[in-house]
Amino acid sequence: MSEQSQTAELTANQTYNAEHTNTNNGEHSVSYGTYFMVWLGLVALTSVTVTVAGIHLGSLTLITALLIAAVKTTLVGYHFMHLKFDNIIIKIFVMVCLGIFLCLWILTFADLSFR
Amino acid sequence: MTEHSEVMQEETQIHSGAHVHRDDEGSKMAMWLFLFTELLLFGGLFLLYGSYRFEYADGFKAAAADMNSVIGAVNTLILLTSSLSVALSIAALQRKQKALALGMLWFTIICGLVFLVNKYFEWSHEIGMGIYPGGPALENMSNGEIIYFGLYYVMTGLHGLHVIVGMIFIGFVMFFISRDKITATNYQKLENAGLYWHLVDIIWIFLFPLFYLLH
């Protein structure tokens, strides 16, 4: 009897898991530790930005600050926003959107620089 | 036998539950599309910042030197930590740790509040010094500095509004979690609130160096 109920429970669990996978963006349970590591990385990069800003690098200061911000954004997007686990179509959407945004910058600065 | 039929019934319920119209992937995609419009909203302002900085480099540097980079750094840490707590709350809910998930969301809202309080003190200080549209200090500044402070108020103000909206969004999600409308198997709304909050964090990641550090 108990064996039968165990098997039945197992089947129920399997059905449950199958339903879970279909609806909630796949099974992805990230460990709490991973999130803490990402956070530590973000805090470290913030302190790097603050330190680098204190050193006078001339025109490189702006580029360095933006590069570090871009790395931080990648960390947040990939881990916190779960792009890591997302469907390829969402990844493509994000890349296309960032590509358009980059084009806007390049075109604007191409105009500004050659005035 | 009765146990077996009970399980069968549960299975049927779960099975029929799978047919309830719910499209998490679509919901997530819609949220991302919305975030793209947000990117263009702030992106346009960042572009404006970039172009004016290109034209008034000295004015921008002089104005940024007046900023309190300590408050900016503290606010950065607060938002990064709140992003962590949102991510943790999703992980906790996935593990069916409802209380922990709610606790993490409370923590996020408190972080948002502390961020806004800091912002309030910061703005009050600047307004107190006469730096506001038509203010005595702003009138004596160079064009570059005036544009810098205009962008500063618009961009951090708009960002602050987003923090408020994010807190309200998270508040609704917490209500749904407490009523078991958002659960370990149905948490896309929480995920979407998280996406929004992370976007607000990302915008600040760029605002912080551009307004507080580049002098």
Image (cartoon, rainbow, N blue to C red):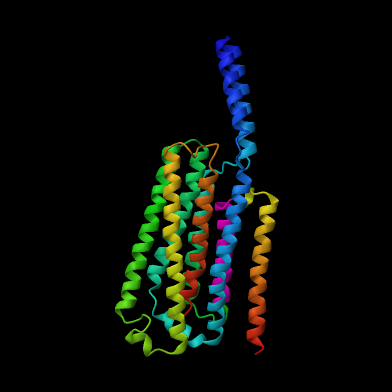
Magenta-span inclusion, residue A63: yes
Q: Is residue A19 above or below residue A87?
A: above
Q: Is residue B170 above or below residue A53?
A: above
Q: Residue at x 46, y 88 (%)?
A: B143
Q: Residue at x 48, y 46 (%)?
A: B88
The residue closer to the viewer here, A60 or A107, is A107
Q: Residue at x 58, y 19 (%)?
A: B7
Q: Is residue A108 above or below residue B24?
A: below
Residue B6 falls in which quadrant of the image? Answer: top right
Q: Residue at x 52, y 68 (%)?
A: B206
Q: Is residue A80 above or below residue B185?
A: below
The residue closer to the viewer here, B190 or B179, is B179
- Chief secondary structure of the magenta portion: helix
**Left or right for A10, reference B57:** right
How many numbered circles are shown?
0
The residue closer to the viewer here, B111 or A37, is B111
Q: Position of residue B51 (x, y in %)?
A: 57, 81
**Left or right for B176, reference A28:** left
Magenta-span inclusion, residue A67: yes
Residue B186 falls in which quadrant of the image? Answer: top right
Q: Residue furthest left?
A: B128
Q: Is residue B175 in view from this perspective?
A: yes
Q: Is residue B76 in view from this perspective?
A: no
Tell me the magenta residue range.
A62-82
Q: Position of residue A67 (x, y in %)?
A: 58, 69
For the N terminus of chain B, give its image quadrant.
Answer: top right
